[in-house]
Image: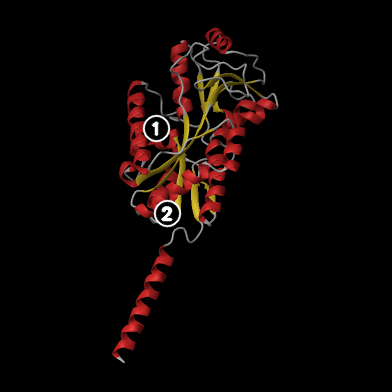
Amino acid sequence: MKRLTLALLSTLALAISGAAVAQDKYPSKPVKLLVPYAPGGATDITSRLFGEQLKNILGQQFVVESKPGAFGILAIEEMARSKPDGYTLFVGNVSTNAITPVLFKKKFSIDFDKSVVSVSRLAIYPSFLITTTTNFDVKSVSELVAYAKKNPGKVRYTSAGVGSFPHFDMEIFGRRATVDMVHIPNKTGAAGMINDLVVGDAHTAFLNAASAAAMIKAGKLRPIAVLAERRLTDYPDVPTLAEAGFPGVGTLHWQSMFAPAQTPKPVLDTLFKAIVEASKAPALQEAFAKQLVSVKPSTSLDEAQTWLNGELDTWRKITSEVKIDLTD
């Protein structure tokens, strides 16, 4: 009887252990990917392409949810305050996760450095210095500079909001070119910037190539320089910004995934490994190639965090040297 009791207890313990392992398996339900912009921009595109592959790899839906506003702070704080179990994540970029925490630190109700952890870099988007074709016949960087000098204060440029990297990039460009331009911030990201340009409310902007491609093809936008190490094969006649006379100006437009800082390491490991696997999927590679995007996951969880810390340090230096009006 005693042996039977021990056997039953052993079987029960194994069953309970097995149930616990099954319950702890991540993910066991859909995962939310918060995006700080309206649909259609680079961050949204990145989230959906990776989300589809992560679903295939991990067997659960990765649902993209847009939560624009407040320089990305609304979405970041929702993610950071969520249960740290890997079911609410955030996909952001250099503006929301390197500039905003530095420039708008006092607007946060959380400590960004202690509340947010980097899971992995996802992709890097080349950008264009672009102009509208609506009542604006400027076809090169030199023509843009000449027009702005001849018409001080009349050239309007758009960005993804006050303090976004396209805002900083254009301010730095303007100073290097010694021209005075007017900032038209748009808080809805690339989609809003494109609308500003197409309707002629803005004349120029730094805009990622993927988001701009359709309107370039339609003849509504004109790329006059590319922010990349070399010319893009799809746009061989568009010079790099360095070739156009402005080396060192402009920001690499990266996208990355983040999680609440207390997320268990096994969950982060699962996510990181799945992201690396997803980055190698032919369907994802092909989709990003069409968008002229480099798929560049981090090499490890530690490297992902070290890299983010480096980006934050870079923007602490830039924002201390380049003062901009935050009341636009």
Frontmost residue, 294 versus 246: 294
Q: Is residue 107 shown above or below 51?
A: above
Point out the residue furthest to the right here.
218
- Identified by mark 2, the residue type is Gly
Residue at horizontal 37%, vertical 79%? 11
- Identified by mark 1, the residue type is Ile
Q: Position of residue 123 (x, y in %)?
A: 49, 36
Which of label 2 and label 1 is nearer to you? 2
Residue at horizontal 49%, vertical 11%? 245
Between the residue at mark 2 and the residue at mark 1, the CA separation in whole angstroms equals 24 Å
- Report the disc number at residue 86: 2
- In terms of secondary structure, where does tag 1 sit? helix
- Report the disc number at residue 99: 1
Point out the residue furthest to the front here.
3
Display colour scheme: secondary structure
Q: Position of residue 103 (x, y in %)?
A: 36, 32
Question: Contact, CB < 8 Å: mark 2 with mark 1?
Answer: no
Within 10 Å of disc 2 (Cα), the crowding (few <14, some 14-19, many 20+) is many
Q: Mark 2 or mark 1: which comes first in sequence?
A: 2
Q: Is residue 128 shown above or below 99?
A: above
Residue 263 shows up from this direction:
no
Residue 105 shows up from this direction:
yes
Q: Position of residue 105 (x, y in %)?
A: 34, 37
- Report the disc number at residue 305: none
Residue at horizontal 34%, vertical 79%? 10
- In terms of secondary structure, where does tag 2 sit? loop
Instruction: From the viewer's perspective, tell me whether residue 210 is left or right of residue 247.
Output: right
Q: Position of residue 170 (x, y in %)?
A: 48, 21
Within 10 Å of disc 1 (Cα), the crowding (few <14, some 14-19, many 20+) is many
Quadrant of res 218: top right
